[in-house]
Image (cartoon, rainbow, N blue to C red):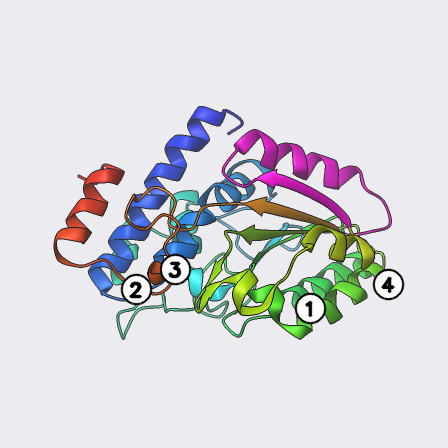
Amino acid sequence: MDNVCSLADKAQKIRRHIIRMIGDAGVGHPGGCLSGVEIVTALYFVVMRVRPEEPKWPDRDRFILSKGHASALLYGVLAERGYFTVDELATFRRPWSKLAGHPDMNKVPGVDMTTGSLGQGLSVANGIAIAAKYDGRDSRVYILLGDGEVQEGQVWEAAMSAAHYRLDNVTAFIDRNGLQIDGPTEKVMGVEPLADKWRCFGWHVIEIDGHDYRQILDAVDEARKVEGKPTMVIARTLKGKGVCFMEGKVEWHGKAPAGDLYEQAKRELGCE
């Protein structure tokens, strides 16, 4: 799928899945799921070499959702990509379900790393990338971090490591929506100048609109051409994108819509 209009249609379906999963379960993280939809959709439907019918294919590209609390985003994409049925999304966060609040690589087909404890995903991505080089595979590793997550110290240790080992098969995205669970990132623990920090740590840095498919795909193409260093894509996004009362509102970081607001969210997204 290389048609931007087709990607937009797919993204809208995934947004509907996210709202239904979280609304029906009564728990979840809609804000950061909705802000990352275009990035993860573009990766799974255009960029990454994967085989949903063979989730453990050794030569596949890998994706790590470092901000694991946005699991509904990953589940929606994986279901649309064919790793499991869309009907299974209705089990999200149920006690017996494999679709838990954080993705589990031992239970969910297509999940390449169990995540949830913030700050650890990039370290894992580095390990996978090193192993790929050691094994002579041309697999690439993609990772999505939250902008609140980069306040974690381990992220910067991993940043140094990726540059030191010249991991040009790592492409990371930061979902830069400006809000974390406790408020604006710049008030809680300022991370700017974010691009300069990554450059100082030895990364190739690209800044884009994280809701613009062409910019996302161009960034990936640029990253593929970079030799000897990892690439960080800082993607400016809108938390809660697609649901008017959630957009830019920190209170929807980890709260499910209920009652009339749930019905409004479904109407805005065109849920049947």
Q: Which residue is mark 3?
A: 250
Q: Nearer the viewer, mark 2 or mark 1?
A: 2
Please state the horizontal and vertical placement of residue 82, each as a whole percent of the image: 41, 46
114 left or right of 19?
Answer: right
Residue 129 visible in the picture: yes
- The answer to whether residue 227 is magenta is yes
Alpha carbons under labels 4 and 1: distance apart: 13 Å
| Residue 164 - label | 4
Q: Residues within 10 Å of mark 1 (few under 14, many from 20)?
A: some
Please state the horizontal and vertical placement of residue 264, each as a whole percent of the image: 18, 45
Q: Earlier in the sequence, mark 3 or mark 2?
A: 3
Q: Amino acid at mark 2?
A: Lys
Q: Nearer the viewer, mark 3 or mark 2?
A: 3
**Residues tagged 3 and 2 counted as in contact (Cβ below 8 A):** no
Alpha carbons under labels 3 and 1: distance apart: 28 Å
- The answer to whether residue 206 is magenta is yes
Q: Which residue is mark 2?
A: 255
Against 26, residue 41 (above or below) is: above
Quadrant containing the C terminus in the rendered view: top left
Alpha carbons under labels 3 and 4: distance apart: 36 Å
Q: Toward which corner of the image does residue 121 lie, by quadrant?
A: bottom right
Q: Earlier in the sequence, mark 3 or mark 4?
A: 4
Label 1 element class: helix
**Extreme residue in the left direction:** 260
Label 4 element class: helix
* Residue at x-position 53% and y-position 65%: 187
Q: Amino acid at mark 3?
A: Val
* Residue at x-position 58% and y-position 45%: 235
Q: Which residue is mark 1?
A: 123
Chain part drawn in magenta? 204-229
Alpha carbons under labels 2 and 1: distance apart: 29 Å
